[in-house]
C-alpha cells in the first residue's frame, strides 16, 4: 500500500477527538487524495471517502462490523448480539425482521403517531415561555415509537427512557463521566427492554394470537427465531427493541437541523410554503447531506480483495468518512452551500448521499430506517413550516464540529409558540437577528 499516503502523526486518536467531523477532511485536503493511512487507538487504519470508497466499503459480505468501532461506542449504539454485529446469513435473516417492521404500513403508522404527539404537545408549548425543540422532539419520538411497538409509556417512565436513549446517542462520541453516565443509563434501559420481552412471553406463552395481526413490533421481536429455529434470548431481543427506539429518537437531531436551516435561510421557508411538488423532499435531503450526523463508520475486512491496486487482507481496519463523503467536492458542486435544488434532478445510486450508510438496504448494512427518517423528518418540516408559528429568541445557535454527534449549543429554543391551521395565512414576523447562517460555515 506504498502509493497511499500515511499521516505522519504516530496516532490520530487525539487529533480526531479535537477536530471532530473535520479531521478526515483536513487530511484529505492536505494529501490531495480520498484515502490515507493513519493509526487510531494505536491500530493501523485506512480512512476513505467518496462514492467509489462507499461502493468498495458496502459491497455485501466484504466487511464485518465486529471489532470495527470502539467498544464503548458499540455498547451504546448497538451492543452485543444486535443485527449490526452479525455477518452473512445471520445478518440477512435478522435484518429481514427489521425490514418487515419498517414496511410502508409500519412507517405510516409511526408517522401518524408522531403527528398525534406533536398535536398534543403544541398546546402545552403555547403556555410555555420557552421550549427547547431538541428535548421536546426526542420525547415525542420516544413516546410515538413505544406506542408503535405496542408499549405504553407515560410520565416518569417515558422521561427516563427518553433520557437513556438521548444519553446513548450523545455519549457515543464522548469519554469520561459523560460516557460513564450513558453506559449506566443504557443498562437501565436494557433492564426495561428485557422486562417488556419477558412480560410479553409470559402473557401469551405461545404463538402470537390472531388478534395481533402479525404482531406488534414487540410481539415480532419476542417471537422471532434465529436460523437455528431458536427464540432470541431476552438479552438480545431487548437489545433489538432498543435498536428500534433509539434511532427513532435520534431523528430529533435532523428535526433541529431542519429548523436551523429554516432560520438561516428564510427563503427556504417561503419555498416550502409555496407548495411546489418535491420541494419538501429536496429540502429534507439537503438537511441530511449538509448537517453533521454520524461522522464515521468502520469495518473489518472479512475476505481478501483488491481496490485501487492494493490488497486488503482479512482483519484490516477501514473507516469510511460519512460526513466527508456528503461534502466531497468531487461528488457535490459547492458542497459547503445549503442548496436543496441540487436534488431536483438527482438520482440516488446508493453511494453518494450516505448520512446513514450506503449500498442497498436489502443486501447491505445500510440503515433499514432511512426511509422512515425521511418520512418523520418530512412530517416535522410540515409542522415547522405550516403547523405552527414561533420566534427564536437570542441564544447560542453555533454548531461545533468538534462535538460528535453535533447539535446547536442551545438545542434550539423556541418562544411565542402558537398553532396555526395548515395552509392558513401567516402573520409577518421580522427575521430574528440571532439566526445567522451556521457559524462553522462562515
Image (spheres, rainbow, N blue to C red):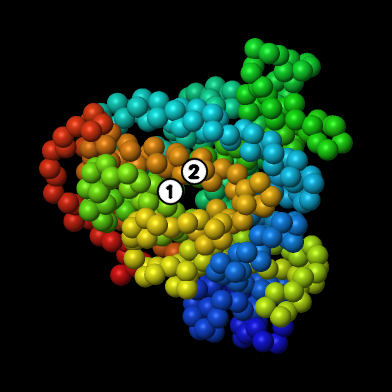
Residue nearest the observer in this picture, 158 or 31: 31
The answer to which image quadrant residue 83 occupies is top right
From the viewer's perspective, is 77 left or right of 406?
right
Check contact, mark 1 vs mark 2: CB within 8 A.
Answer: yes
Q: Which residue is drawn at 53% across and 78% down?
A: 28
Residue 112, placed above or below residue 82: above
State the residue position of label 2: 373
Q: Where is residue 276 in the image (x, y as percent from the top left)?
A: 28, 45
Q: Position of residue 106 (x, y in %)?
A: 55, 30
Residue 229, placed above or below residue 9: above
- In primary-sequence order, the first of circles 1 and 2 is 1
Q: Which residue is drawn at 51% across and 66% down?
A: 325
State the residue position of label 1: 254
Can you say which quadrant of the picture contains the C terminus?
Answer: bottom left
* Viewer-nearest of discs 1 and 2: 2
Can you say which quadrant of the picture contains the N terminus?
Answer: bottom right
Q: Residue at x 28, y 34 (%)?
A: 387
Residue nearest the observer in this picture, 184 or 397: 397
Residue nearest the observer in this picture, 418 or 227: 227
Amino acid at each position: 500500500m506504498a502509493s497511499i499516503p500515511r499521516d505522519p502523526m504516530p496516532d490520530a486518536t487525539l487529533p480526531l477527538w479535537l477536530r471532530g467531523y473535520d479531521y478526515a477532511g483536513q487530511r484529505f485536503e492536505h494529501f490531495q487524495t480520498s484515502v490515507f493511512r493513519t493509526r487510531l487507538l494505536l491500530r493501523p487504519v485506512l480512512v476513505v471517502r467518496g462514492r467509489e470508497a462507499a461502493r468498495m466499503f458496502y459491497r455485501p459480505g466484504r466487511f464485518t462490523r465486529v471489532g470495527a468501532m470502539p467498544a464503548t461506542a458499540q455498547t451504546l449504539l448497538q451492543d452485543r448480539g444486535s443485527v449490526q454485529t452479525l455477518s452473512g446469513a445471520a445478518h440477512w435473516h435478522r435484518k429481514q425482521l427489521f425490514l418487515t417492521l419498517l414496511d410502508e404500513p409500519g412507517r405510516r403508522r409511526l408517522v401518524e403517531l408522531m403527528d398525534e404527539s406533536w398535536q398534543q404537545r403544541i398546546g402545552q408549548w403555547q403556555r410555555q415561555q420557552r421550549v427547547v425543540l431538541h428535548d421536546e422532539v426526542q420525547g415525542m419520538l420516544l413516546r410515538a415509537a413505544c406506542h408503535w411497538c405496542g408499549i405504553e409509556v407515560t410520565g416518569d417512565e417515558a422521561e427516563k427512557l427518553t433520557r437513556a436513549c438521548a444519553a446513548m446517542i450523545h455519549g457515543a462520541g464522548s469519554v469520561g463521566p459523560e460516557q460513564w453516565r450513558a453506559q449506566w443509563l443504557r443498562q437501565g434501559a436494557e433492564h426495561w427492554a428485557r422486562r417488556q420481552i419477558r412480560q410479553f412471553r409470559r402473557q401469551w406463552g405461545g404463538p402470537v394470537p390472531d388478534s395481533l395481526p402479525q404482531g406488534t413490533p414487540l410481539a415480532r421481536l419476542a417471537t422471532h427465531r434465529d436460523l437455528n429455529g431458536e427464540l432470541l434470548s431476552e438479552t438480545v431481543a431487548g437489545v433489538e427493541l432498543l435498536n428500534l427506539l433509539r434511532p427513532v429518537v435520534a431523528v430529533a437531531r435532523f428535526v433541529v437541523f431542519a429548523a436551523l436551516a429554516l432560520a438561516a435561510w428564510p427563503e427556504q421557508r417561503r419555498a416550502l410554503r409555496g407548495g411546489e411538488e418535491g420541494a419538501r423532499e429536496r429540502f429534507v435531503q439537503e438537511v441530511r447531506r449538509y448537517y453533521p450526523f454520524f461522522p464515521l463508520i468502520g469495518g473489518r475486512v472479512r475476505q481478501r480483495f483488491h481496490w485501487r491496486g492494493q490488497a486488503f487482507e482479512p482483519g484490516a481496519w477501514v473507516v469510511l468518512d460519512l460526513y466527508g463523503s456528503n461534502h466531497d467536492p468531487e461528488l457535490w458542486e459547492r458542497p459547503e452551500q445549503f442548496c436543496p435544488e441540487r436534488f431536483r434532478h438527482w438520482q440516488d445510486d446508493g453511494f453518494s448521499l450516505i448520512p446513514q450508510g450506503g449500498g442497498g438496504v436489502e443486501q447491505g448494512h445500510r440503515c433499514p430506517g432511512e426511509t422512515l427518517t425521511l418520512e418523520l423528518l418530512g412530517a416535522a418540516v410540515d409542522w415547522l413550516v405550516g403547523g405552527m408559528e414561533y420566534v427564536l429568541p437570542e441564544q447560542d445557535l453555533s454548531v461545533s464540529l468538534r462535538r460528535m454527534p453535533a447539535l446547536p449549543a442551545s438545542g434550539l429554543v423556541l418562544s411565542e409558540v402558537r398553532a396555526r391551521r395548515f395552509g392558513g395565512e401567516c402573520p409577518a414576523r421580522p427575521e430574528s437577528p440571532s439566526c445567522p447562517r451556521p457559524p462553522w460555515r462562515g
